[in-house]
Image (tube, rainbow, N blue to C red):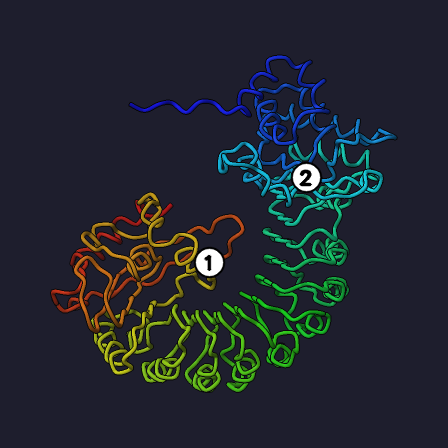
């Protein structure tokens, strides 16, 4: 017979106090600090406004992580907290009990409340005091401005009620309140409102900025002075910037923008999507960089040979961990340019994405020696480029010694297509066999993914990252089938991990070649191939903040079966799958 656990004294005391609001308010000066968090949560949830006000004025911790408790449709408790802060700020002689200096409105630090409520540690709470309490003189605390942390995600044209109320409250108390945020995300908001918000924020607190909407260059130039004041900025993401056809009138804007990088002394990650304004003047921005970058992404734009020369000579990229130049056409560039660039970053580079760059055989052969020296390389993608089977074999052999390389995405060889650019199944099957023989000859377990043109992300790495990092092999199967750009009947019976989820959910035809033990239900040993054929029809609309467009590709020309019937291999797609794909496109696409 199970004996119910008796209530703790802490729970009994909290329940007793909340029965009489007057008694709890009068007892706050003598209340053990261990009771404050759990009592505050109860008062907050029950909307005991007067109790909340009194508790804020006697709060015995430096931080009050209120964001974890806020229910935005009900801002009454938040207003009570702000009113209590007004009383605190007006006090000439501060309360000896109150240590509150930081109000955190971000949805973080749930651990604080569970820790003090005893949910995770019924034996005591003393170990959790250090992160939230700081010994300092009451006078010094009272003189320092109160810091208010919040999340700034500007998603609408106008400010919501919560942000409007908070900004008005801060604006009236500028001298005693510092409004801080670590991450600023802009999705859709007028520059007038953006300026209004930023004028109230401590810009040196911002560490990350994401502009997830298309701006005119003049709009970015208006935003630039605020950017320059973000002296602790570490990550900057800018999405497409529209440039006027009259470039002469835009030069002043370009100078205004690039000169701000001189003031960003902590910048490490720089992501520029479709920065057409940098064509022919990338050096202006590079000269203004003050820090060594860890991650650089310049995608879907035109650059000149001069731009690439300046990039390869820039001292600020010598420690790059990730380089992404997706959709930057290099077809007419000298082969040596890529070689010099890759040599510059070979000691530290971990991720290299050169999709949809129009790279030809001669250019890729030139970088093979440098590529083989990238000892830290773990992810490498060349999708959407025109490479022959001979060059792909050289590439596989040159990269065989890269022990960290675990994620590889390559285009189907040129020989896979007819003169009209139609992928042919018979040739694909033959080339698949050749690639497997190369992998067997190299004698090391290895997975490579071969994509038909166009690149699966159509000039972007988001689909790949969503599958391999965010979605994972488990979550991808939880997505509604209507969101999968594939025909489920074509994969009936296909199972397993490894490359299978990528194959089954990918937006274009993909081969997953697995040298080593195939991770399917029928486990095999030795060299084998895991092939998954995905719908060539399905676009994937990127999520807000993501880049990328339609991920469709050409339909396969019918030919002999793609895979020989071998027992260890996963089941062959249904022979009528391609016809069904064409007939069912409307049902499969969002």
Q: Quadrant of residue 15?
A: top right
**Which one is in front in this view, the residue at disc 1 or the one at disc 2?**
2
Quadrant placement of the C terminus: top left
Q: SS class of the residue under badge 1?
A: helix
Could you tell me which residue is drawn at 61 percent across and 58 percent down? 237
- Distance CA(mark 1)–CA(mark 2): 37 Å
Could you tell me which residue is drawn at 65 percent across and 49 percent down? 184
Q: Is residue 420 visible?
A: yes
Q: Is residue 9 left or right of residue 219?
A: left
Residue situated furthest right in the rendering: 92
Residue 111 image offset from top left, x and y in percent: 54, 40
Relative depth, front residue between 428 and 374: 374
Q: Which residue is mark 1?
A: 462
Q: Which residue is mark 2?
A: 63
Relative depth, front residue between 243 and 221: 221
Other residues around mark 1 within 10 Å, as few (<14) / some (14–19) / many (≥20): some
Could you tell me which residue is drawn at 74 percent across and 67 percent down? 248
Relative depth, front residue between 242 and 363: 363
Name above or below for residue 264 compared with residue 345: above
Name above or below for residue 397 compared with residue 484: below
Could you tell me which residue is drawn at 68 percent across and 72 percent down? 286
Quadrant placement of the N terminus: top left
Q: Is residue 360 left or right of residue 262?
A: left
Q: SS class of the residue under badge 2?
A: strand
Q: Quadrant of residue 102?
A: top right
Residue 362 image offset from top left, x and y in percent: 44, 86
Residue 341 image offset from top left, x and y in percent: 56, 80
Name above or below for residue 402 compared with residue 563: below
Other residues around mark 2 within 10 Å, as few (<14) / some (14–19) / many (≥20): some
Residue 462 image offset from top left, x and y in percent: 46, 58
């Amino acid at each position: 017979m199970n004996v119910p656990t008796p209530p703790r004294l802490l729970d009994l005391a909290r329940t007793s106090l909340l029965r009489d609001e007057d008694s709890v308010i009068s007892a706050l000066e003598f209340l053990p600090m261990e009771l404050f968090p759990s009592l505050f949560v109860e008062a907050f949830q029950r909307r005991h406004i007067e109790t909340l006000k009194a508790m804020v004025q006697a709060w015995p911790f430096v931080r009050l992580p209120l964001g974890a408790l806020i229910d935005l449709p009900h801002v009454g408790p938040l207003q009570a907290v702000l009113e209590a802060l007004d009383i605190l700020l007006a006090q000439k002689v501060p309360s000896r009990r109150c240590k509150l200096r930081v109000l955190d409105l971000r949805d973080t630090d749930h651990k604080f409340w569970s820790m003090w409520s005893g949910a995770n540690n019924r034996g005591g709470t003393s170990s959790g005091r250090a992160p939230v309490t700081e010994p300092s003189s009451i006078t010094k605390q009272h003189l320092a401005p109160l810091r208010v942390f919040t999340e700034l995600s500007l998603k609408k044209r106008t400010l919501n009620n919560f942000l409007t109320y908070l900004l008005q409250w801060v604006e009236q108390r500028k001298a005693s309140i510092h409004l801080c945020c670590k991450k600023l995300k802009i999705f859709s908001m007028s520059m007038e409102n953006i300026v209004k918000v930023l004028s109230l924020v401590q810009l040196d607190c911002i560490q990350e900025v994401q502009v997830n909407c298309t701006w005119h260059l003049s709009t970015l130039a208006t935003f630039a002075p605020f950017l320059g004041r973000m002296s602790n900025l570490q990550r900057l993401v800018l999405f497409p910037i529209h440039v006027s056809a009259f470039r002469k009138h835009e030069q002043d804007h370009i100078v205004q923008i690039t000169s701000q990088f001189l003031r960003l002394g902590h910048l490490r990650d720089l992501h520029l999507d479709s920065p057409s304004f940098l064509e022919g003047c990338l050096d202006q921005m590079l000269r203004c960089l003050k820090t060594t970058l860890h991650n650089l992404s310049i995608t879907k734009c035109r650059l000149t040979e001069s731009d690439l020369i300046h990039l390869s000579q820039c001292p600020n990229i010598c420690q790059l961990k990730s380089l992404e130049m997706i959709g930057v056409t290099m077809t007419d560039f000298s082969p040596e340019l890529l070689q010099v660039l890759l040599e510059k970053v070979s000691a530290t580079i971990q991720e290299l994405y050169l999709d949809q760059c129009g790279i030809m055989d001669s250019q890729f052969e030139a970088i093979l020696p440098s590529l083989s020296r990238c000892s830290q390389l773990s992810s490498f993608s060349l999708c959407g480029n025109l490479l022959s089977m001979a060059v792909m074999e050289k590439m596989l052999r040159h990269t065989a010694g890269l022990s960290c390389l675990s994620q590889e995405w390559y285009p189907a060889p040129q020989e896979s297509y007819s003169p009209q650019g139609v992928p042919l199944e018979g040739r694909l099957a033959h080339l698949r066999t050749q690639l497997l023989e190369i992998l067997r000859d190299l004698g090391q377990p290895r997975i490579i993914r071969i994509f038909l043109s166009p690149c699966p992300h159509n000039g972007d790495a988001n689909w790949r990252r969503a599958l391999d990092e965010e979605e994972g092999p488990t979550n991808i199967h939880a997505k509604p089938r209507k969101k999968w750009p594939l025909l489920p009947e074509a994969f009936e019976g296909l199972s397993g991990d490894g490359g299978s989820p990528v194959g089954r959910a990918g937006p274009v035809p993909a081969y997953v070649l697995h040298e080593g033990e195939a991770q399917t239900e029928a486990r095999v040993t030795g060299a084998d191939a895991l092939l998954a054929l995905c719908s060539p029809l399905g676009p994937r609309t990127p999520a807000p903040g993501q880049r990328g467009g339609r991920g469709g590709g050409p339909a396969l020309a019918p030919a002999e079966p793609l895979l020989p019937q071998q027992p260890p291999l996963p089941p062959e797609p249904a022979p009528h799958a391609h016809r069904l794909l064409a007939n069912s496109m409307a049902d499969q696409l969002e």
